[in-house]
Amino acid sequence: MIRVAVAGARGRMGSVLVRSISDDEKMNLVAAFDMRDIGEHVSDNVNVSHPDDMDAVLKETSPDVFVDFTNADAAVRNVRIAADNGIKIVVGTTGFTDEQFNEMKSAIIRNKIPAVISPNFSVGVNVFWKLVEYAVRYLSDYHVEIIEMHHSLKKDAPSGTALKAAEIIREHLKSIGRKCELVYGRKGIVGERSHDEIGIHAVRAADIVGEHTTIFASAGERIEITHRAHSREAFAKGTLRAIEWVHKQTKSGIYGMDDVLGF
């Protein structure tokens, strides 16, 4: 059995993940952390613990894998505590600054543990990124726009998934000698669209789980690559695969879902 601890256990994603881990015969939820519902029963004999007690709880419960779906500020602290306890890590939190990501990276490298960090654990989204990577090889002279939609409570914009799609495209364009600027929405008299830009647009409304579309457009035609998440179960399934994968790893370092899925 893989012993798992979850931070953000009462959040939208964390709640689904807690149920999925509890229902998985290969896993055992041993600790859950959140700022809300402290002491509330979440699974078997596991109650919600306050993040301030994380170090003590992790030492007491000895999880094999620590999973974080919180926010960027909290995740940096949580990852540092888990890494210092020698626990393998899976991070699905998004919205990190470069400084925050580097702080997590330093803790992971210093403690010589494996960690999977991804802006999206959906298997479908990871295939979506591969399709975008394939398409841009042949459509590098097309205009590119990215539209992402999420629920009204999502705090960061644009989404990590949209940003990764943009980075995949930018890396290819850079490799063929083209500059590329990210433009976040447009307003006013912006002039003609530059060929060396990627437009990124964020929609926040109601209970949209997650939708991402990358548009490649040229005179006379348009190709759209879209992924729609119908529920958070899609993200939970991919996260369980990441938990199983990182639990088997003996080599330290930071990995992504490409590694988990064998791309």
Image: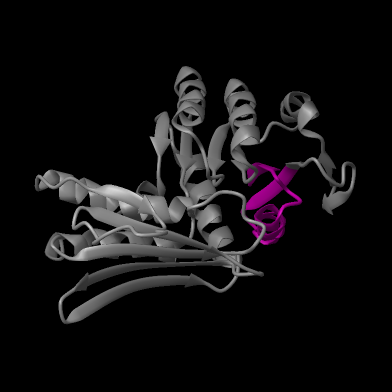
Q: Is residue 70 visible?
A: yes
User: Percent from the top left, x then y, of residue 68?
Assistant: 61, 42
Against 259, residue 250 (above or below) is above
In-image side of 46 versus 189 (left or right): right
User: Percent from the top left, x then y, of residue 183?
Assistant: 35, 52
User: Percent from the top left, x then y, of residue 72?
Assistant: 59, 38
Q: Residue at x 47, y 26 (%)?
A: 99
Q: Residue at x 19, y 61 (%)?
A: 136
Count of marks placed on residues? 0
Verify whether residue 25 appears in magenta. Answer: yes
In-image side of 74 versus 150 (left or right): right
Q: Residue furthest top?
A: 110
Q: Nearer the viewer, residue 259 or 220?
A: 220
Q: Residue furthest front?
A: 189
- Please state, as top left, top right, bottom left or bottom right, where the C terminus lies in the image: bottom left
Q: Which residues are magenta?
A: 1-30
In-image side of 104 versus 127 (left or right): right
Verify whether residue 45 appears in magenta. Answer: no
Q: Is residue 262 visible?
A: no
Q: Nearer the viewer, residue 249 or 162?
A: 162
Q: Residue at x 69, y 61 (%)?
A: 23
Picture quadrant where residue 34 is located: top right
Q: Residue at x 81, y 35 (%)?
A: 50
User: Percent from the top left, x then y, of residue 40?
Assistant: 89, 48
Q: Nearer the viewer, residue 93 or 1?
A: 93
